[in-house]
Structures are given as structure tokens and as C-alpha cells.
Image: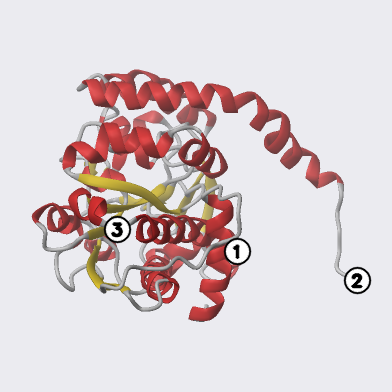
Amino acid sequence: MKRREFIKKAGVAGVATAAAASAFPSPAISQGRKQWIAVSAFGKAGLLGQALNEFAAFVKSVSGGKFTIKVYHAGELVKPFEALDAVQSGTAQMGYGAPYYWAGKSDSISFVAAMPYGLTAQEQNAWAYFGGGIEQADKLAYNPLGLKFLPMGNTGNQMGGWYNKPINTVADLKGLKFRMPGLGGEILKSFGVNVVLLPGSEVLPALTSGAIDGTEWIGPAADMGKGLYKVVKNYYYPGWHEPATILDGFFDLKQWEKLDSEQKDIITRGSAATNLFILSKFQAINNSALQKLINTHKISMNKYSDELINAIGARATEVIPKIASKSADAKALYNHIVKFRSTMVDWSNFSEANYLQARGAANFKAI
């Protein structure tokens, strides 16, 4: 997507997603110029790298060039999983990644990313922007680390993952070496899975060498781009572990507080625009990628058995509360999300779930 097209669309998306009632303003930046450094856990190639570049272009454009962000993708300045350290140390003022990458820093932060059997992307945005989610994430996960949080992307529903052999029963999980970050990985550990955390750049080499038996990544478009189909052919769904995943923009809290209201507004709206841009783009490109994986690359599409989905779901209700009980902040954030989830279930079932079942009654064809 060309820069001007992104800025135009992102401006509209940002207003909507950030729940701005008025038209997007052209704020008057203070006379001084400001330059930030941003570091990312993701590589330059692909949608996530592109989106961060366009976010920086958005900030520069809307500020009239007075606020610029120099982007360093994974490995260009720091290693992927060192992005948060770089912001905390003052090397960078902004970082970009996925909240569960920073689980070693906080007992609560993984809950911001995604909870197995939790919220859909629409529900997550409702939680973040209208359910107090951003404020709770700041208070209970990011502020204690000296950071300010804003959602900056959502993968939507992910795929269940790639395996080098069929997985049909709970017994098939035991002993597997599987790459899965976040709370989903903690659940798999309870079934005897050897869970491995790897940055994106290391996933395909590990799969190729046999260092891991399988991996989840994101969805068809991102998975095809990473070439996972070249090594294994068993592709599973649904992504119970990440029904939708928030990507995080995190900012040095002291530097954030030094921004004036107009600068904060640009960052907030630009982040919201990026959030919607990534979610919408994944939705737009996943099906064509899926068809190519099936028809050209001959992968095997496999639905998790009811035995596995039910067993993992039951285990999730045991494991996740235990993780949440590790600290007062984690418990508070877990409870906040669970309570919000309870307010979403009925409406989502009456609306989205039932509509998706009903949609097959009409078989439209282009004319």
C-alpha cells in the first residue's frame, strides 16, 4: 500500500477505532522538533514490518515533519526479544512486538496479548477502547515496567499450527517439541509438550533441522510467507490458543509524559489506525493464501478433534487461573478480561456465531 493511501485510510480508521467523535484534526505541533527511535521484535519484510514503517510515516506527515520516528526492525539495532529492554534502558523511546514476548518481565502482560478460548478481535477492540482495557493494561502490566501501552495491530483468529505428524489425541501431544508463546504454551506444557519460544526469524530453521516438531505462527498469509509449508504439511485449525492477538506499541513512560497533548493525540490515533490496518489486511489476504496452500502446495488441512479441543479447554480453565494467581496485578487483569468476556458471549453468539451458520443458506455468484 502506498504511503498516501495508507495515511488516508489510516486516518479514517484511527478516528473510528480510537472512538473519536470529531473529524481527525491537524494538530499544531510545538515549534521544536522531536525524533524518536523505535525498535521492533518483527523483521522488515511482511505486513508487520510494513505497518511499523507506515506508522512512522503517518506520524511524520500529520506532524508536518516536526515529529519523526526512526524505525529499526528486528536485528537492525537489537535482537527481536530485546526490544523492551531497549526502551527501558533509554536506547529507544518506542518498541513494537507482542505482549507475551515480555512474559519474563511481568506475570500479567501475556493476558494483554490473547487468552486461550478468550476474546475475538472485535471483542478485544471493544475491551481495549470501550471496556477500559488500555487503562487496565497500563496500570497492571506496562506502567510498572516504566512503559505506556497502546494496541498497534491484531492478527485476528490464528491457525492452530503446523505439525510434522498427525495430532489426533491427547496422547499425541506428549513429548512434542513445539513453538508456541504465551498462555497457550503454558497449557501445552501441562500435557507434556516441550514448549519452545523462538523469534520469527528462527522458526523455519528450527523446523527444518528438526529442533522442533511443529510450530504455530499467525495465519495462512504470514505462514505461507515464512515458508512453513516447505517443511511440514499438517496444518491444524482452529487457533484455540490465540482467538485474536493484540500487538503492542510500548513507549518509554517518561518520554510519553513529556509529549504535549497534540503529540500524544497523533501517536494514539496513529496506533489505532495501525491496529485496524493490520487486522483488516490480514482478513483481506488470508483466504487467497489459504487456497494457494491447499491447491498449489498441497498441505493437509486438519481440524483439531473434539477430544483435543475439549481436553485443552478444560485444562485452560485450570492452568490460566493458576498463572493469574502469581501476582496481584496478573489476578486483577485476568479478572477484568474474564468479566468483560462474560458480557460478550451472549451477543457474539446471537449475532456473529449464528450469522456465520446461517450465511451458507445464500449461495451468491458474481454476475
Residue where numbered disc 1 is placed: 284
Which circle's residue, 2 or 1, is located before the other in the chain?
A: 1
Q: Is residue 286 visible?
A: no
Classify 302 as above or below 199.
Answer: above
Circle 2 or circle 1, nearest the eye: 1
Task: Answer with mark 2 or mark 3, whichever residue precedes in sequence.
Answer: 3
Figure coloring: secondary structure
Q: Secondary structure at mark 3?
A: strand
Mark 2: amino acid: Ile
Residue plotted at (67% across, 28% down): 347
Note whether 180 is above or below 292 in the view shown: above
Q: Residue at x 18, y 73 (%)?
A: 76
Q: Residues within 10 Å of mark 1 (few under 14, many from 20)?
A: few
Which element carries disc 2, helix, strand or loop?
Answer: loop
Residue 154 screen position, x and y as percent? 46, 52
Estimate the x, y position of residue 342 in percent, counting from the top left: 54, 21
- At horizontal 22% and vertical 48% (from top left) the residue drawn is 253
178 left or right, relative to 355: left
Which residue is denoted by mark 2 in the rendering? 367
Residue type indicated by callout 3: Tyr
- What is the distance, in whole Å, between disc 2 and disc 3 at their CAs? 44 Å
Q: CA distance from mark 2 to mark 1?
A: 22 Å
First-in-chain label (1 vs 3): 3
Q: Is residue 126 visible?
A: yes
Quarter where residue 170 is shown: top left
Q: Are marks 1 and 3 in contact (CB under 8 Å)?
A: no
Residue under circle 3? 96
